[in-house]
């Protein structure tokens, strides 16, 4: 039998740089109250959002991904020529062909890149980060650009207050590369396909969700997944400096943090609350929250962060990472 040559792997991987992008158009709760039956107090009380960003006519999944990805490459101290793989996590591209990744790679200048889109909805970035880490660790990729980019305003009924107050547009990105010391832990992921109808699309291509059911699921099932990610990484809750859950709803974020603290997480664990000023940006929320926290000085290089994404599918994924 002929022996096949296989790629040579590396001991570990880490995030080398992060970046994010948001449209310029800021939409406040008062702005929304002019087109639907809602008000600032009602929105803040239920989901914790004060404002969000909606894309303009020229803002697309691809354009926001290019901006966020370019920033992440620069933050990593690299050039496009240093990367060979692009993964774009998203669930809002209007046309599935051509995929966003090929367009993003070309516009950034990553030539002949392996490129594909990944749809795990709001868990998409964490799914893609796990895939990218495994690709680099196995030797199939030298360095990968992972982007979550969403234009949710394309699939939201602007008069439906159950969704229009929550969702927004943005992109977040990370560069994954080799490391002598592991900086990205194993991914803990899965799906609850029996609950798939909780979040979906109408015939008019508008997103819908059973808000109370999703809330109960997320506040009871996600903390155990976070604990699983910690266990896979060989860590305890007290080892975590930063918690960055998907920014679905501030009340869900607070519930997850509370449960982890009951399991031993420290009181000084920093918890992402980007939902307040960015809204729910699906697969973009985790990397963008990390980037905003870095820019604000709330997290620092070397901090141990627990990432956890969850959403339609119902899909979930999480891993421990060392902040770049």
Image (spheres, helix red, strand yellow):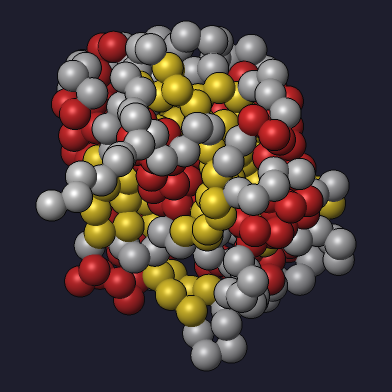
Question: Measured along the vertical axis of the image, is residue 1 above or below residue 232?
Answer: below
Left or right side of 303 for 287? right
Choose between 103 and 239: the one closer to the eye: 103
Residue 48 location (% of width, % of height): 55, 43
Of residues 1 and 286, which is closer to you in this image? 1
Picture coordinates of residue 65, whole percent (x, y): 69, 49
In the rendered image, the residue lying farthest to the front is 2
How many numbered callouts? 0
Q: Position of residue 321 (x, y in %)?
A: 40, 23
**Residue at coordinates 69% horizontally, 34% vertically from top-left?**
81
Above or below, 193 against 65 in this view is below
Is 222 rendered above or below residue 29? above
Q: Quadrant of residue 35?
A: bottom right
Extreme-left residue of the structure: 1
Q: Is residue 269 left or right of residue 275?
A: left
Name the image quarter holding the C terminus.
top right
Q: Quadrant of residue 224?
A: top left
Residue 184 image-quadrant placement: top left
Q: What residue is rendered at 68% in x and 71% in y?
A: 154
Q: Residue at x 86, y 62 (%)?
A: 58
Q: Is residue 163 at all visible to an observer of this figure? A: yes
In the picture, measured across the screen, residue 167 lies left or right of residue 260, that is right
Res 219 seen here: no
Instruction: Kindly identify the residue that appears in the image at 28 percent across and 11 percent down.
Output: 239
Left or right, residue 30 beside residue 114: right
């Amino acid at each position: 039998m002929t022996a096949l040559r296989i790629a040579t792997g590396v001991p570990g991987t880490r995030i080398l740089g992060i970046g994010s992008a948001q449209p310029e158009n800021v939409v406040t709760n008062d702005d929304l109250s002019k087109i639907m039956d809602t008000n600032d107090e009602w929105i803040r009380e239920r989901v914790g959002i004060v404002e969000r960003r909606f894309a303009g006519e020229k803002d697309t999944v691809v354009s926001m991904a290019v901006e966020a990805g370019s920033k992440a490459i620069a933050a990593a101290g690299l050039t496009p020529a240093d990367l060979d793989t692009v993964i774009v996590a998203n669930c809002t591209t209007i046309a599935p062909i051509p995929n966003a990744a090929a367009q993003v790679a070309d516009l950034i200048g990553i030539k002949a890149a392996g490129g594909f889109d990944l749809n795990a909805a709001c868990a998409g970035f964490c799914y893609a980060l796990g895939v990218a880490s495994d690709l680099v660790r196995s030797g199939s990729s030298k360095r990968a650009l992972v982007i979550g980019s969403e234009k949710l305003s394309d699939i939201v009924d602007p008069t439906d207050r159950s969704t229009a107050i929550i969702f927004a547009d943005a992109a977040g990105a990370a560069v994954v590369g080799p490391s002598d010391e592991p900086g990205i832990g194993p991914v803990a992921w899965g799906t609850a396909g029996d609950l798939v109808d909780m979040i979906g699309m109408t015939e008019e291509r508008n997103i819908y969700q059973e808000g109370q059911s999703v809330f109960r699921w997320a506040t009871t099932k996600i903390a155990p997944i976070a604990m699983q990610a910690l266990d896979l990484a060989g860590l305890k809750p007290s080892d975590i400096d930063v918690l960055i859950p998907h920014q679905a709803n501030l009340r869900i974020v607070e519930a997850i943090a509370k449960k982890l603290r009951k399991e031993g997480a420290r009181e000084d664990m920093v918890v992402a609350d980007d939902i307040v000023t960015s809204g729910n940006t699906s697969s973009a929320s985790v990397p963008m929250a990390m980037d905003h926290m870095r820019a604000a000085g709330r997290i620092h290089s070397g901090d141990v962060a627990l990432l956890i994404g969850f959403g339609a599918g119902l899909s979930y994924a999480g891993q421990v990472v060392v902040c770049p």
